[in-house]
Amino acid sequence: MLSQENNRLIIKDGFGTVWIEAWGKDSVRVRMTKDRQMDKNNWALGIKNEELRIKNEECDIKISEIDTTYSWAKDFEEEWKAGKVQIQQTSGQVASLKNGKLLVKVNHENWISFWKVEDGAETLLFEEQWRNRWRIDRFCVPTNTAGRELKNNAGTFNSKATVRFEAYDDEKLFGMGQYQDSHLDKKGGIWELSQKNSQASVPFVISSRGYGFLWNNPAIGTVSFGTNGTIWTAEQTQKIDYWVTCGTPSECEENYTSVTGRTPMMPDFAMGFWQCKLRYRNQAEVIAVAKEYRRRGLPLDVIVIDFFHWSCQGDFKFDAEDWPDPDGMVKELSEMGVKLMVSVWPTVDERSENFDEMAENGFLISFDKKDGFNMDWMGNTVFFDPTNPECRKYLWEKCKENYFKKGIELFWLDEAEPEYGLYEFEHYKYHIGPAMECSNIYPYYYAKAWYEGLKGEGVELPLSLVRCAWAGSQKFGAVVWSGDVHSDFRSFRNQVQAGLSMAIAGIPWWTTDIGGFLGGNIRDEGFKELLVRWFEWGCFCPVMRLHGERPPFFVPEKPYHEVRGHQIKQMESGQNNEVWSFGEKTGAILENLLKLRARLKPYIKEQMVAAHEKGTPVMRPLMYDFSNDEMAWEVEDEYMFGSKLLVCPVMEAGAEKRSVYLPVTNSGEKWVNSADGKSYEGGQTIEVESPLNQIPVFSLGNFDIKIW
């Protein structure tokens, strides 16, 4: 049965109740439930976003249902052009909903398809895959397979959700967040919808067929982009929920970020160079490193104090023995023009001074099927629960007292997946529900806690370094980095695609541990080559940050502290990790690259404005700017850094040349090699010199900043 409720199209059949409604420019939201009432969680689509307050003259449908608990819904509802859903009766029940260029059709058997309407012509974007009924107008196989289904999980109050769509041989899919593989095109892969160290599931994709798709569900699941069908699943959930838009890649990205939120403007200092290592052991080391950068006349904008600067996990404060005067340290760094960032972990040790209070107030993750701890590394710990708004307030008050009041406004929110000792999500439960239903949204609320706290204290542009993200995390000033990746060229190659995939998934502030985190002997010539190539690429990333564990480790002089009657081991430290630590030849190259990054800052700022105002990724695959060039959809090892620079990282050991594809430009403008000034027409592949001290970088026309 098809019906219309205000301006919502409703399908009721034996499979459940489906809502289809306009939700942003050229976009719709589709939800399905088997319950009497639709679950009211809006997830990524439910937070106030100023972009929706504008009039949308192309919208044929008035948005009539956005959970009224959000007061912002009333603010812009009247500004939308009122319209109606047209339901037409033919030989069976047929209905359509049009919102701008996007047309949704429901056929006589209640199958849903999505079309782009332009200049009066309709083009199929994609459609549900049903295999349980006969159709006269379309191929079908009667294998009794539904295009969408919710099947109750025995003994629970939730269901397993499955949505199936037809596959297309010519389709390419970009986005999905951060996975450790080498391919930008996700077609043909099976992707786990769960958060892990170095894996950030942000389930938004842009298709070469002209649409964008968000799986608006934080449940644990999978998606398969197979050759015989696309299948999205959520293992335990209350509803099916997804969002669709259409247009060019840039239009899809703008529409997506307009409904999930856009990143704040990045503060100027954050566009420079960040120095970090595992780990600065005390206050004297931090000050000495900053002074040495200044003595050498090298740019340094942020220095980071890593984990175990505390006495015990969950104390959220400096250990007084190693950090006797944090206020003075912050003041001295500030006088040198250096910002200080400190690490926060979600792990709360049973010996922490805060453990009992947090446990009693429900601020720690609870257990659905067993008791115990989440992680036993350096102590028995349980993760705090940022999905609880009272926990978020509590955490900020602790950090406000112990860090913010000392002048620290930058926080490194580590372990943000969170990193369970065993990823047995069925055992854990959050304030907002079982982990199986919502665990993927953990990093979203983690970043939100510090964003809310900093904003509440009057910080105009909050920024935090976070080790994971979900759809919408960008609006909380989250700089996401790619986790504890290995120090080798294969891992380096994976990070290039990870950054580009995260950008398409709506996360424009992104970085890596330059040189990789795990491994990297600072005296090894092979590692030095890798470091230089990674550092060169880092100059053309949204955030440039040097980090790594750098074995072999130093042994702490005083390996234990007394905390609540227990001897607690302190974390060791790796080798030096500053630009002068890798020998004279390597150091000279790195110093020149630091100066290059400083020269690029005005250009980077322009790109950050575009990310803030329009959702435009700072780094993005070639297809984003050159979608009409078929080859631009094929190239996976080069990218645009902003609107003018084509960057081609060197990701093979010993390579001193590489082939470069120059896209067909929209204006016919030529590509200029920044190394020698030679110009080239677009639409060709050339071989380019790439000596160790530079990578190929081309500009659209003449670029007014010296690269090499």
Image (cartoon, rainbow, N blue to C red):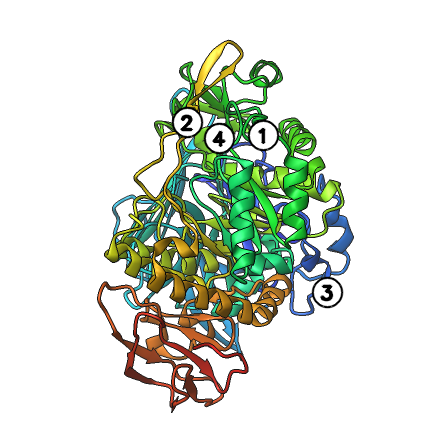
Q: CA distance from mark 1 to mark 2?
A: 18 Å
Name which residue lies at 72% across and 51% down.
460
Lower position in the chain sequence, tag 3 or tag 1: 3
Residue 254 position, x and y percent, is 57, 64
The tag on residue 345 is: none
Lower position in the chain sequence, tag 4 or tag 3: 3
Q: Which residue is mark 2?
A: 557
Lower position in the chain sequence, tag 4 or tag 1: 4
Residue with the most extreme left position:
654
Q: Is residue 11 shown to the viewer in this render?
A: no
Q: Amino acid at mark 3?
A: Lys
Of residues 417 and 140, the one drawn nearer to the viewer in this rendering: 417
Q: CA distance from mark 4 to mark 1?
A: 9 Å
State left or right for residue 285 relative to residue 574: right
Name which residue lies at 49% across and 60% down.
105
Q: Which residue is mark 1?
A: 318
Q: Amino acid at mark 4?
A: Phe
Label 3 Cα neighbours within 10 Å, binned few <14 / some 14-19 / many ≥20: some
Q: Which residue is mark 3?
A: 55
Q: Which is closer to the viewer, label 2 or label 4? A: 2
